[in-house]
Amino acid sequence: MESRHKPERSRFGRLEGSDIDGVFFEMLRAERAARLGRVVFRPNADVYFDKRKNAVVVRLDLAGIDPAEVDLEVDESALRISGVRTDQRHPDAVYQQMEITYGPFERVVMLPPGVDPEQATADYSHGYLEVVVPMKPRPERKKIAIERRDEQQGGEA
């Protein structure tokens, strides 16, 4: 005899048991990494070349992060952005959903040859950090006069 009982549908939709386990393991891994002082997340970034500024622009989504908690290091090959998003969770709250990642972060952006790290600038506004790394000016070409030595020596070869 065939059962007409429909199995109860999971509140997680199509997530299977192993998928749910993976979600919990990822949460625990992030929590453990935060306790050990390791990087927990990489902020989203847009990296582009601004023709008008003749510069590489790196724009990072750092919502909720105090700019005083952000370190920037730049050299001729890379820009390194690191810092901490401090935990602002309410201690008495019972969360239904938690998607904001707290803890240390780091992002390294490779830069093209020819940037001028000494001229880099950074601005923070409305949760976005924008770092502008200008290109070095192209050296001007110089004409070099060719001196003919055979004429100075009386035509001798």
Image (cartoon, rainbow, N blue to C red):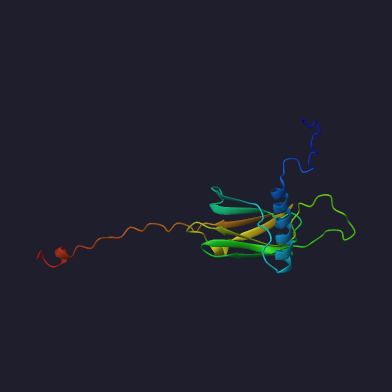
On-image quarter of the N terminus: top right
Q: Is residue 43 above or below residue 76?
A: above
Q: Is residue 37 left or right of residue 117?
A: right
Q: Is residue 12 left or right of residue 55?
A: right
Q: Nearer the viewer, residue 60 or 118?
A: 60
Q: Nearer the viewer, residue 83 or 98?
A: 98
Q: Residue at x 73, y 60 (%)?
A: 28
Q: Position of residue 35 (x, y in %)?
A: 74, 67
Q: Position of residue 9 (x, y in %)?
A: 79, 39
Seen as rendered, the residue at the extreme front is 1
Q: Is residue 35 above or below residue 58?
A: below
Q: Position of residue 10 (x, y in %)?
A: 78, 42
Q: Nearer the viewer, residue 39 or 56?
A: 39
On-image quarter of the C terminus: bottom left
Q: Nearer the viewer, residue 60 or 123?
A: 60
Q: Is residue 21 above or below residue 72?
A: above
Quarter of the image for residue 106 reads: bottom right
Q: Position of residue 140 (x, y in %)?
A: 41, 57
Q: Is residue 114 left or right of residue 38?
A: left
Q: Residue at x 76, y 56 (%)?
A: 64
Q: Is residue 134 left or right of residue 20?
A: left
